[in-house]
Each structure stands twice: as structure tokens, then as C-alpha cells.
Amino acid sequence: MNNTFKKVMVTGLTMAMVLGGSTAAFADNGNGKGKGNDKDRGRDAVQTKVNNKNNNSDVYINNLNVKNMTIKLSFDDVKGADVEWAARYIASLASKRVFEGYEDGTFQPRKTITRIEAITAAVRLMGLRDQAESTEAMNSNLNFKDADKIKQKYPWAVGYVAVALQNDLFQESDDSVQPEKEADRLWATTLLIKALKLQEEAKAKMNTKLTFKDANKIPAGSVGYVEEAIEKSLVDGYEDNTFRPDRPVTRAELAALLDRTGNQLPDNTSIKGTLSAAVSNNTLTLTNNGQPYTVELDSNAFIFRNGVKVAASELRSGDQVIVRTYGGKAIFVEVTKAAGGNSTTPDNATFSASLNAAVSNNKLYYTKDNQSYSTEIASNATILRNGRTVSASDLRSGDQVNIRTYNGKIIFVEVTKLAESQLPDNTTFAATVNTAVSNNTLTLTKDNQTYNVSFASNATIIRNGRTVSASELRVGDQVNVRTYNGQVIFVEVTKLADEQIDFTVVGNLNSYTLNSAGSIATISINQTLSNGTVQTAVYNTSSNLTIQGDLSQLTTNRLVELRGKDQLVHTIVIR
């Protein structure tokens, strides 16, 4: 092995590959700040021999190995200001196979996360996926009270629970996993501090006085974990200075938490460098530690610069980047510091600008005088939009604003002109339902624009001449919608959707009936509405019914996905 590569190894840099005739490699400085277990990190990697351009010497490097899987980084349902801020986190985690989408190609960012899903993601983040999926781990004897339930309903998760237990992700007093329980903010925060192996640091902060208005809702034994998470910038409070420890975490929110945590763990699937030229012939050219390298860009690469997803042509020489590869091609590129951009923000001044992204990680991304900036928002900042005080999350890409800064932070934002794609507020308008209601959110199409808007708690919904729940709305329904203060207060379906369309529903199996041939004729599932009410829906099946999964697992309360067309179920997926 040559001296150059030895030096790379000594300095903690890990090389990553490039495919075919390109002669390239990258390096990662691996300066994670946490104490994550790294003994199995890289077990998803294979060694590949590449050639260094300067000295024509062979080096052996790691490349993410996902066998024949397709890595999906962008999801069509990550749309709307309430979730678009998480697109970068989602793509970053998916590129590492830590937190991925569903088989149907969706990510479902508004869906609340369960404990078993969060535990699985945390174990993967620690680099222990192969260990968790090994035969030894999968055959572990779990001593939890609900061990039988996990083995029967979540057999794929047995190894993850076993490895999580070995790595102190559970409390000593935990006697149950409670796999289906929603993961709340406090529980998720504690889990990730443990994933970083920072329990001792957290315990040393147990007597810290938290300044949140609802600090009294945080148990004394959890104060140190919250304080440590805040200091490590994993989590913060809300604009009203609350922490909301009991609030369930959505998949979008967990993606942000996981990615921030991952930034403090060693990671040899990521590579860092500085672009030495603009993208040419679909190839990245960069340097690391004085060495020049090139790598081909995947046609579907996710590229993030200045707070927004961009085309490869937006990358600039001098950009500092993090790159992840698959099959020798770059599939994820994030500019951590833009060349020539992000100049010093005007301080202690008021100026006009245009927002170029939704608020992310408590930073405002905007353009002023053709220069891009990202600036932290002060905790007591005042934000005015549409004539009223709002939270930072209400700001929209395209809003024209006046900004006031003080001591390097934004203390005041006033929207002087709304983004053109803003959904009409305090008015009634016609639209078409775009997707089924999820997490109390209605997705609409109006004037070829897609919007996401939440329902008010007392919203009235009329369909087919009767008052119904939000779950009764169907994709393709033409509706009149009335909004007030940014929420839907009234929906009337003016034209029912053409029922001859594809549909997908998920619920817990209630029962099914068989026809004379012994095949499933009807199937009913239970679904929980946003108000807590459980409703039962019955579906007829088509003659060519397909069942995905182990039929013996099709038992009462089993989570199933029904896919159909023309009001008939053609596929049952046993989860």
C-alpha cells in the first residue's frame, strides 16, 4: 500500500470509489463528534480498486453495497411547506439506507413514527444493520413481556431489538418494547443521545434548569438528555418556547433528528471534498487533501445547494461538498459551503430579499442582490405574513420580505409580497383532491399547483349530500374549500371522483370471507380516524387476487395494505 493511502488512513479519511474509466477517489475526514459504535460501520461496503490521478497508484476503498436494490432519494409525496424542509434529510438518510421509503414509492412524511421504526432507524444509523439482520441476532431470545408479539408481528425487527438492547438503547427498567406506540419527542431525543453513546454526558446535566415554558412536563430523569440534545443541536424548541415532550414525531421530523445525529457519528459511506470545476460531461471534479479526483453523477442524483434541491449545473468550482456513491456514481451531493455565496449577512440592518426555500434547521434561506444567504433565526424573532404574526414554518419559497438582523441573527421578517403559489386564505375556492387525507392534512390541486393544508378541528365536510369524516374524501373529488387562518374549515364535494381509479388503503385486518373455491371474496379492515374513532371498511376482491406475504400471517389485527381498482381489491400486502 502506498504512503499516500497510509496517510489517508492515519488521518481518518476513507476513500470512496468511482466506476469504469473514471480514475477517482474521495476522502472523508470522519470527524464525528459523538461516540457511536463504529465496529460494524462499513459492513454494508465492498472494497474496490481505483487509480489515483497524480501518482497512478492503486488504492482500495469502500463503496456502499446495496446489492441489486434501487435507492430512491426523492419522493413525490414530500410536497408542501410543512414537509418540504425535510427533503434534504430524507435524501441523505435514504442514500445511506438508514431511513427509507415504502414499497409503493412513497415516504409518507406526515405519518407518525412508531417505536419499532425509530429503533430500527437508530440501529442502522449506528452502522449495525448487518449485525441486526444476521441469523444470530434474528434468533435472539428477547426477554421483554411483548417478545412474542414482536416475533409474530414484526419478525424482521427481532435482530434490531436485540442489537439495540446490547447497545444500551433501552432503559434498564423497560420490560416491554411497545413496538406500535407512537414515538414522542422526549422518547426519540433520549434514544438518539444513547445512539451517540452520550449517556454519561447527559447524566452530568440532570440538574440543568431548562428554560422551556413546559419544562415541568419533562421528567427529572430526562432533563440531562434534553439538555445534551440541545447542546448537540439535535433538537430545539418551538417558536413559543415550548418543547412539547409528548408530541408524536412524524417521519419527516425523525429524518431531521436522525440526520443531525448522523453528522456526529463516523461515516465511511460519505466523502468530502472541494469542487475544482463546474460539472462537465456529467462528471464531478474535486480535490481532497491536495489530491484531484473525478466521479460520474448518477442521472437521478439528489443535489442540495443553498437550502434547495438544484440541478448539477448549479454546482460551482470552490463548493465544499459531501458526496455519497452507489455503483460508482454519485447519488447524493450536498454543498456544505457554497463558493462565493453565503457572504457575510448584512448585520444590524434592515434590507429586502426573496426567500428561496422553506425554513430548515431554524435557518432562513434567501437571495439579496443576486447573492444567496442562510441566516439563523433568533428565538424571539417576530415574523409577519399576510397581516398577522406567524411562525417561521409559515414562510414560503418565493415570498418577498423585509429582514432585520442583529448580532448575526434574524430578529424580524415581514412578508411584503406573498409567493404566487400561496393557497388563498380566508376565502372559498374550487380545487381537486390530490391524495387521500393523511395526518389531518388535505392535499389539493388548484390551477395546476399542489397544496397541503391542515383541517381545523371543527371542519365540516360534505360528500354525496351528507356530513362525513375527512377520510371519506377520495382522490379526484372536485371540491369547494373554505379556509380561515391557514386551515380548512369547510369542504363540499361538488363532483364525486370517478371511482374507476386505483386506490391503496392501509388498516388492521378485521375479517375476510371465502368463496366456494376457497379464495378470499371480501376483506374488511379497521382504520382509526383523526378523532380517534375506529371505522370498518369492507371491500370486494377481484378474481385475480394476489397476496404478497405469508398467508398464515393474515390474522385479526394484522396490518395490511389493500390495493385495488374499479372498487375491487386486486392485491393484499401482509405487513
Image: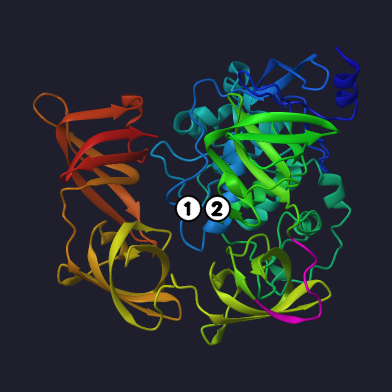
Evaluate if marks 1 and 2 touch, with contact meaning CB atoms under 8 Å apart. yes
Q: Is residue 415 above or below residue 117?
A: below
Based on the picture, tell me whether residue 262 belongs to the magenta stretch: no
Does 346 lie within the magenta span? yes
Amino acid carrying label 1: it is Val
Quadrant for the C terminus in the image? top left
Residue that badge 1 annotates: 78
- Image disc number at residue 252: 2
Q: Residue furthest bottom?
A: 387
Task: Compare residues 13 and 52 and report the one nearer the observer.
Answer: 52
Residue interval drawn in magenta? 342-352
Q: Nearer the viewer, mark 1 or mark 2?
A: 1
Q: Position of residue 70 (x, y in %)?
A: 48, 29
Q: Residue 280 falls in which quadrant of the image?
A: top right
Query: x%, y% of residue 307?
Result: 63, 57
Q: Residue furthest left?
A: 516
> To which quarter of the image does residue 358 belong?
bottom right
Q: Secondary structure at mark 1?
A: loop
Q: Quadrant of residue 130?
A: top right
